[in-house]
Image: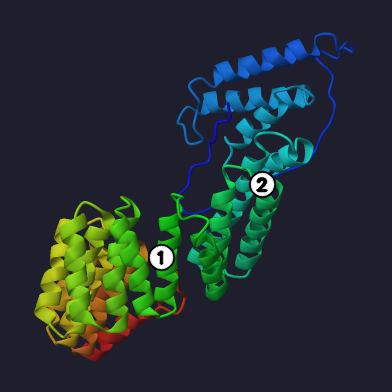
Amino acid sequence: MKKFIIAEICVLLALAGGFWLGRVTGGSTSYEDYYDNADKAWAAAKALDEPPIELDSPDTDRLRKVRAAYREVFDKYPDSLWADDAIYQLASRIPRTDEEAFALFRRLINNYPDSEWADDSMYAIAFASYKIAEELKQTGTLESVNSYYDRALALYNQLIALYPGSDLSDQAQFNTAMCYYGKDELNLALSTLDTLREPFRSSPLLYQILYVTGEIYLKKQEYENARVEFTNVVDSGDPDLAPLASFGIPQSYLAEGKYQEALEGYQKVIDLYSDTKAGQDAYFYMGWAYERLEKYDEAIAQLEKGIQLYPRNENAANAQVYIAQIAHRNKDITTAVDAFQKVADNAIYDYDTRRAAQYSIGKIYEDNGDTDLAIVAYEKLLKNFPEPHKKASHLSNNITENHIQSLRSTGL
């Protein structure tokens, strides 16, 4: 029975080459026991892999033995019934973006095109290529991003053409739109998703199609169209996508400058989905909406509430910085410094955010002519954050002992 190891939401993975006919064992030239020995090797590999070991298992010794056992099956018995299964099982125990995994998946596709794992393997390379592109975008390494999206697109289209009856064909069609979306070819992504609506009207993928369509409209600043799509997803009651779509509605109002409507939308997300990440995020975004309405006290109170309730939310650090910025703009130096210090002293926040906050404290004091306190803040910066900010142009990188000595001289 076919067992899918791949399991990801809304997207994509894998491929490889090489084939040789090996001897049976110990240099023997007899092939009388070839298939019996292949069956035994496969049974031994499956026994080692019971229960199936995961890629991230802490039992690295067992993982190493399982990998070796599967490799023995297809290296020694490439013409056996189990060779393609062994290649797939080994490739699935190697990191998805690893070139060795790509090579194994390609080998399976090229040498065993009729294998039940061929479509999975093609999907695997496509998915991995998509994920690499997404990661490169996050890190700002943009030179090769489109080449990975294009590789994924080519493989998805190949899978759709070669394996139209595959269980993965529908997901591959959806994922082609995700590749266009990743490349910022928004109109092409929209048209691709639009062609899938009718044939996928009874598919679990339908609400993914509607949700991503809403996201694209939001990015295109077509706010009313975005809200229509998000509302359709909310009405579906999909447990995964309805909270995200509900959050998308006030996001569209915030982007459009309709801040009161945004506040009402965020409150609805909190009321309906308080136990989801969307519900958590809504607390913080309500603070930002209040700030846009110039209701600064309400903004600070809302942001502080979000931080108190969800201190490990990814928005918490930025919310604390925002409190400091609001206070500073309103010339409340004490509150601003206190908020920045909470960021700088919080070990769960990332290094650059903390370093920047400590710099801001010194800068506030320096700009207000309080040289002694500025010196104390900058000395703490050099002591607690000895590594430079990763952004070379960040002003905190200009703070050196020479700068501190200059301040001392000014204060004399």
Q: Is residue 369 above or below residue 315?
A: below
Residue 190 location (% of width, % of height): 51, 70
Q: Identify the amino acid type marked 2.
A: Glu
| Quadrant of the image occupied by residue 75 | top right
Q: Give residue 237's position: percent from left, percent from top.
A: 29, 53
Quadrant in the picture for the N terminus: top right
- How far from the left and from the top, in percent, is residue 349? 29, 60
Residue 377 versus residue 294: which sits nearer the camera? 294
Secondary structure at badge 2 equals: helix
The quadrant of the rendering that contains the C terminus is: bottom left
Q: Is residue 40 above or below residue 105?
A: above
Residue 297 seen in this snapshot: yes
What residue lies at 35% left-to-right and 56% top-to-bottom? 241
**Mark 1 Cα shell of 10 Å, populated few (<14), some (14-19), many (≥20):** few
Q: Does residue 119 appear left or right of residue 183 in this picture?
A: right
Residue in view at x 29 percent, y 60 percent: 234
User: Which marked residue is nearer to the observer: mark 2 or mark 1?
Assistant: 2
- Pointer 2: what residue? 99
Q: Which is more N-terminal, label 1 or label 2?
A: 2
| Residue 387, numbered label | 1
In the drawing, does residue 257 fall left or right of residue 179?
left
